Amino acid sequence: MTVKHFALFAWAAALGFPSLAQPACDARADAEVDAVTREFAARSPGKGTGPAHQVWAKEMHEALQAVAQRHEACRKANTPSPTAAQTQRRDGCLDANRRQFEAMDKRYQGRTLSFQEQTQWRTEQQKLLDERNACTQQK
């Protein structure tokens, strides 16, 4: 794995795959990741150096983590707060979803499920999780 691939993987993992809604924050974070990558590539201890490589990788990870934290702070600062109606709509959607989960749990609770029932349970659970995710994505 090259330094560039390592850096991009670590950056994406630290950010949790950022939203595309904040282009200025994203551009700044991309530039910072490139700078960190160049800096650490220039002082790479090379392969087979064991402890030195571990220290280098840890420092690189910490630098990328700092970039991720600045990026997240930028995104939060530039994201408008939801209105009361949006919050109420999201909370209502989540409450309905929670009730559906509870009803599903009651149906399958306290017994050993057959293979078909397990498949049905998992399908229903995945559908409800997708609906919950849609609730949190509402604007």
Image: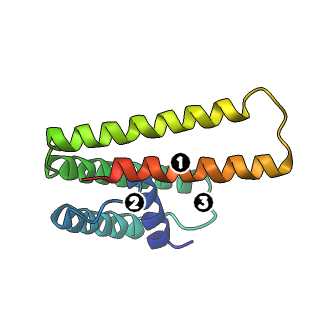
Give the numbered dot on residue 49: 3
Closer to the observer: label 3 or label 1?
1
Mark positioned earlier in the residue sequence (1 or 2): 2
Disc 1 marks which residue?
128
Mark positioned earlier in the residue sequence (3 or 2): 2
Under circle 1, the secondary element is helix
Q: In this image, 124 relative to 118: left or right?
A: left
Give the numbered dot on residue 101: none
**What's the amino acid at mark 1?**
Leu
**What's the amino acid at mark 2?**
Phe
Q: Quadrant of residue 15?
A: bottom left
Closer to the observer: label 1 or label 2?
1
Disc 2 marks which residue?
17
Across and down, in percent, residue 102 comes to: 57, 31
Count neighbours of disc 1 (C-alpha within 10 A) and say few if under 14, some if 14 to 19, many if 20 or more. Answer: some
Count neighbours of disc 2 (C-alpha within 10 A) and say few if under 14, some if 14 to 19, many if 20 or more. Answer: few
Count neighbours of disc 3 (C-alpha within 10 A) and say few if under 14, some if 14 to 19, many if 20 or more. Answer: few
Residue visible at 62% across and 37% down in the picture? 104
